[in-house]
Image: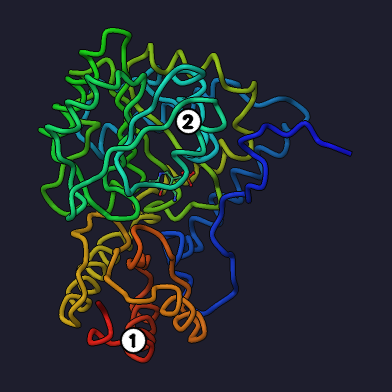
Amino acid sequence: MTLPLRDELVGLEPYGAPQLDVVARLNVNENPYAPPQSVVDAIAAAVRKAAEGLNRYPDRDFTALRVDLAHYLAAESHVDFLEPKNIWAANGSNEVMLHLHQAFGGPGRRVLSFAPTYSMYPEYARDTITDFVTLPRRADFTLDIDAAVAAIADIAPSMVIVASPNNPTGTALSLDEVRALADAAAAVPQGCVLVVDEAYAEFRRAGVPSAASIIPEYPNLAVSRTMSKAFALAGGRLGYLVAHAPVVDALRVVRLPYHLSAVTQATARAALAHHKELQAQVAEIRAERDDTVGWLREQGYTVADTDANFALFGPLADREAVFQGLLERGVLIRVTGPEGWLRVSIGTPQEMALFRSALLEVTTPEVTQ
Ligand code: PMP
């Protein structure tokens, strides 16, 4: 039997990194610290309460959760204009991104991004039959803003997506850079939304701003966040977005009804109420990140400056062999980014000690190119 599969999907494998039961899982940028027992109890109580009403569909507009997210983001990013109508949420920021493509992408439209970047971006575009165009980053993974501004004028995309901090490089944008991109997007005659994907925002170094703080100035700017990373809630599946109300209203049109389950809403609200406890180790992870970067550089590796909870290092003559060697020693990292580079997520001090000793055993700077 022949399945009428779309041509562009023939032979493709589903996206996803290996899920292996090893000592140090440093491959998908999770928070290595499980929620503390007090938060586990609060989430369990909230889910128990939600279970009492599971015969009914959940609040389609997740009003209470939007209020809580607006409060959280207002405090975190010092934006006080935020109201629930400025907030969107979905099952992970992956689904938020898909909604953006469903609303602002589509046949005959283009999305522009800057490579190397998050490998799901081309998939959202593919799945919504949107053309995906990339402009290369500079050798140090920063953006060439003049080239980006020129490309926006030239390509006239309906969306520009830029991760800040970027995955897999960790590179963050300055507010001047975000403004330049947002201005260029605003000048596209057919309209263009600038999406800043801030999945790793809470890990940014002191003094690095969030694009959320300039939302009031830009009706075409959307900032996406997630509870999967700093919040230690990857399993809860909750991503959210902040933008002017017309952007959010467009996303409301394309979402499936009741896309956020009552269990998800209850979990996310309980987690938000305990965001301080859940993010208690963020400072420690940042410090561990800076130590890891410093150590790798001491060994002779080049490491991209990172504002995220991971580091991209290289060059390696045979990155697959290094990945395998680490895995044999119980350390799972990620083969991603340009050829010759590897990405390691920041784990606990014990996990990072294992990473360092395993790396020393597997390869030395002398055998790097
Ligand atoms: N954006 C970036 C840049 C990411 O790295 C990730 C996860 N790896 C996501 C979005 C999606 O995360 P989630 O769906 O868990 O919110």
Marks 1 and 2 sit apart, C-alpha to C-alpha, by: 43 Å
Q: If you read the primary sequence from the N terminus, does the residue marked by circle 1 or circle 2 appear first?
A: 2
Q: Residue at x 49, y 26 (%)?
A: 64
Circle 2: residue type: Ala
Residue 291 placement (x, y as % from top left): 21, 74
| Secondary structure category for the residue under label 1 | loop
Give the x, y percent position of residue 364. Answer: 28, 87
Query: Mark number for residue 89?
Result: 2
What residue is disc 1 on?
Answer: 363
The percent position of residue 45, horizontal first and vertical second, equals 60, 48
Q: Dot 2, how many residues are within 10 Å of its Cα: few (below 14), some (14-19), or many (20+)? A: many
Query: As rendered, which of 11 and 86 lies closer to the eye?
Result: 11
For the N terminus, the image quarter is: top right
268 lies left or right of 52: left
Residue 201 placement (x, y as % from top left): 28, 46
Mark 1 crowdedness (10 Å alpha carbons): few <14, some 14-19, many ≥20: some
Residue 90's place in the image compared with 274, above or below, is above
| Three-letter code for the amino acid on which mark 1 is drawn | Thr
At 37% from the left and 33% from the top, the residue drawn is 133
